[in-house]
Amino acid sequence: MSYLGNLPVFDHKTIEWSIFYGKLTQFLRINNVTKEEIKSGILLTHLTDETYRLVRNLAYPKTVVSLTYNELVQIVNSHFESKQCSFVDKANFFGATRSPGESLGDCAARLRGLASYCEFGDALETNLRDRFVLGLGSGLERDKLFEQNPTTLTLTKAIEIGEQAACAREVKVMLNMNDFGRIKEEPVYRAKIHQFARGSGGGSGNDSVGARTSRRETGSCSVCGMKNHYSDKCRYKSYKCQKCGIKGHLKKVCAKNKNNSCAYHIQSEMWR
């Protein structure tokens, strides 16, 4: 006989009995299983060897096959039922914090599971809200919740506000990443022409060296006019000027004179 759904095997060392029993109840219901012997057989055949041995020992001196389904459930329930609330259970609850990468909804659900052992009674929702807010790590979510009025804030509202703050933080990070990819514009400096007579006193060689030294001291590039690098690091150093046709600088900083020979030095006037 085939059944609808899939019932897992129960291992008391890895699975909570209450969770398995809930699944077992639904499995029997959707398959319309009403006979006691069939219900008992389904329960016993979905136990691991070690768990079956445990149930057999709990049933002694009776045998498991002689017990009804309700008797088997009662024996297992008595063994696995939650013990009275202890300080350990409360310590686990009040010490709970949000785990890295855990969503706010999952965090709240985990707190509810821990609170189920603490017998908070009418103070359950208040304790859940307080532990949820105080258990958040430092960040925009906790800052927003700290601004709220504790007398009117509910757990549901706290989760909603926290999720809105988390979305705002993600958008801010995304925008910052986009801004990081933009190239910062630097001022471009005008290149001034100095024509030197060849063979004259002082010579053009020394003046050219002085011009190059001046450009290096100012931290400007003679190739493109930018201020954040030197000409030997410029990505346009292999480009050919569209004005004079000489390779090694751009048109905007070209200083071509009548003799087609140029010398540069950087003037402290912004290029417009």
Image: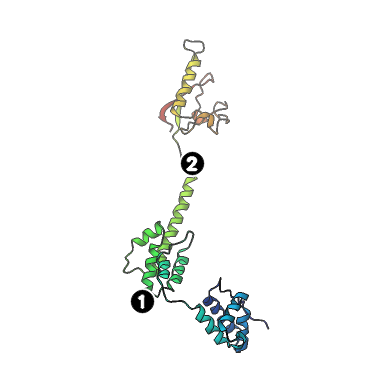
Q: Nearer the viewer, residue 62 or 178?
A: 62
Q: Say if 175 sits above or below 79 in the image.
A: above
Q: Mark 1: which amino acid?
A: Asp
Q: Say if 245 sits above or below 161 in the image.
A: above
Write down the residue under mark 1.
122
Q: Residue at x 42, y 68 (%)?
A: 93
Q: Residue at x 46, y 51 (%)?
A: 175
Write down the residue under mark 2.
183
Q: Secondary structure at mark 2?
A: loop
The first of marks 2 and 1 along the sequence is: 1
Coloring scheme used? rainbow
Can you give x and y, in whole percent of width and height, for residue 163 in the image? Answer: 43, 63
Q: Say if 16 sits above or below 75 in the image.
A: above
Q: Residue at x 48, y 23 (%)?
A: 212
Packing grade of label 2 (10 A; few <14, some 14-19, many >=20) is few
Q: Residue at x 38, y 72 (%)?
A: 125
Q: Mark 2: which amino acid?
A: Ile
Residue that sits furthest to the front in the current view: 61
Say if mark 2 contacts mark 1, CB within 8 Å: no
Side of 51 relative to 192 (left or right): right
Name the quarter where the C terminus is drawn.
top left
Q: Nearer the viewer, residue 201 or 213?
A: 213
Q: Say if 248 sits above or below 94 in the image.
A: above
Viewer-side label of 2, 1? 1
